[in-house]
Image: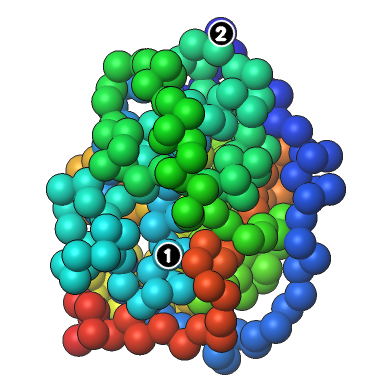
Amino acid sequence: MIENLGYRHDIEDHEAIALGSHPYRQQLMASEWQEADLFSWWHVRNQGPKGSCRGHSLAANARLCYFLAKGEIDLDQDGLSNEANLQDDFSPDYCYYECQKASGISGDNGATIAGGLSVGQAGIAREIDLPYETRYAPSRVTAAIREKAKQWHFRRYSKLTSAQEVFDWVGSGQGGMDWGTVWPLPFTKGCLVKGMSPRQRGGGHATAGGALIRGATLKKLLPSLASELRDDEWVLQCMNSHSSSAQFRGFYFLTMEGCAEVLAHSWTEAIGWSDIAEPRPRKIDFTKRSVFG
């Protein structure tokens, strides 16, 4: 098997991604980016030994985009937001198995970003309907689950090709970033990517980008980065699926230069998802959940 951790860069369908992409338009300038806090409310996942990172990255984008559209996460509409008992999460297993099916991949051998395009636009199941298991069992996805999944689907995605596009997309509240990259990335202080060689090699891994943070804010949380970031520098926060003990509390970060060099790597494919519920102008108040002070 190709050495990988779940993202199959070796069979990625770059042409299909480009063909279905909604035209990217730079609508907001950097001065209008919003600083957001994921630390206090995000459910950090652990995929375990299964190569399901592509499922986790797609489910994470569904979760983030639902929040951006609704201002809260209450999938079961019981008045209790962000429940951690599967009630208010999307299913990484559903996303993984359906991504594999779309790409013709069998066995626990990962998936592609392109494989998630039809899945994201057809519908994503709640985790209460297909709870995550570390055993590989695609037969658990039934026609009934697929039918229920149609309630939650993305209306569009855009192929992201530059760090400016990624930071604009995430910082403006348009949605989340879904990408596959070489792994591990070259982390500074265990969690920050400031650059990457085009010759970097390893496995393949899919993760989700969800927020922008100011350098000054991140340095308060991580004093070890004091000499690595400017106070006024923007940093992209990505959600991993290797448990809360990975990188920093389960998240890792990229400077704009680091993001640009990861995007330039031949293994990388990145898209931005948007509008999983009703589309509308977004000005999300993350501060009410913030640990920033």
Structural crowding at the residue carrying mark 1, measured as other residues with C-alpha within 10 Å and reported as few (<14), some (14–19) or many (≥20): many
Give the SS element for disc 2: loop
Residue 224: % across, % down: 26, 63
Q: Is residue 121 above or below residue 166?
A: above
Lower sequence index among marks 2 and 1: 2
Q: Residue at x 18, y 58 (%)?
A: 83
Tag nearer the camera, 2 or 1: 1
- Crowding at mark 2 (Cα within 10 Å: few <14, some 14-19, many 20+): few
Q: CA distance from mark 2 to mark 1?
A: 36 Å
Residue 20 x, y percent position in the rendering: 78, 50
Where the N terminus falls, by quadrant?
top right
Residue 46, quarter of the rendered image: top left
Is residue 36 or residue 156 the one in the foreground? Answer: 156
Q: As drawn, which residue projects farthest toward the top?
A: 1
Report the amino acid beneath label 1.
Answer: Tyr
The mark found on residue 66 in the picture is: 1
Q: Which residue is mark 2?
A: 1
Instruction: Residue at 35% x, 86% y: name it.
Output: 285
